[in-house]
Image (cartoon, rainbow, N blue to C red):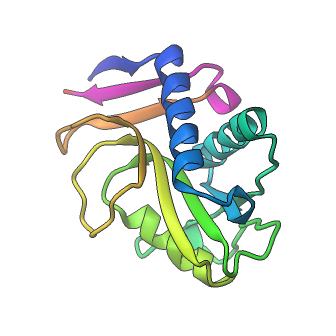
Amino acid sequence: MKTKEVVDDITMNRAITRITYEIIERNKDLNQVVLAGIKTRGVHLAHRIQKRLAQLENIDIPVAEVDTKPFRDDIKVEEDTTVIPVDITDRQVILIDDVLYTGRTIRAAIDNLVSHGRPSRVGLAVLVDRGHRELPIRADYVGKNIPTSQTEEIIVEMTETDGQDRVLIMGE
């Protein structure tokens, strides 16, 4: 298996900053926004975006942690470890994940969100969009588009869990 680094720490930070600026530009009232990170790396991304929003706009945006496992159609898990610190009804929720692939994780995240309230709008921010959708799902905010083959795998490493920031493609 060959592994190739396609995003380094500097490029990853630029992508996160770009997503943050796009969130500011597209959301007139940031007080209505809730960032909802999909466990695990999506939560880390959400906290990084939250920190940049605080630096740029002097605002403290709430961050929710969304567990998709209980809502997946391919695995069975009873316990839901989702943490949503505010009422999301009538709020603009931005789901955040590291990689968008088939769309099934996002569908599960949306199912989980609407079980906790009725947001006025749900957006999607991803660090990497690799294509190959199985469901009609599209990201509103994309850090990097990285086309892959079906046999390749995207691996996102983040300092919080892996000790460094980078994106790798692993393939034959």
Direction from residue 122 to residue 145 in the image, left or right: left
Q: Quick check: 38 above or below 164?
A: below
Pick whichever, 82 or 124, lies toward us: 124
Q: Is residue 168 magenta?
A: yes
- Residue 119, image quadrant: bottom right
Q: Residue at position x 42%, y 76% from top?
A: 73
Picture layout, residue 107 above or below residue 1: below
- Percent position of residue 26, x then y: 51, 53
Q: Quadrant of the C terminus?
A: top left
Q: Position of residue 14 (x, y in %)?
A: 51, 24
Residue at point 49%, 71% (across, down): 108
**For residue 74, side relative to residue 45 (left or right):** left
In the image, is residue 104 above or below residue 88? Answer: above
Q: Position of residue 43 (x, y in %)?
A: 66, 48
Left or right: 91, with 16 as reference point: right
Residue range corresponding to the magenta coloring: 159-171
Q: Is residue 77 above or below residue 125?
A: below
Measured as percent of width and height from the top left, residue 41 is found at 59, 43
Residue at the location (66% across, 80% down)? 90
Residue 26, magenta (yes or no): no
Q: Quadrant of the N terminus?
A: top left
Residue 76 visible in the snapshot: no
Q: Is residue 90 visible?
A: yes
In the displayed orientation, state which residue is furthest to the front. Answer: 28
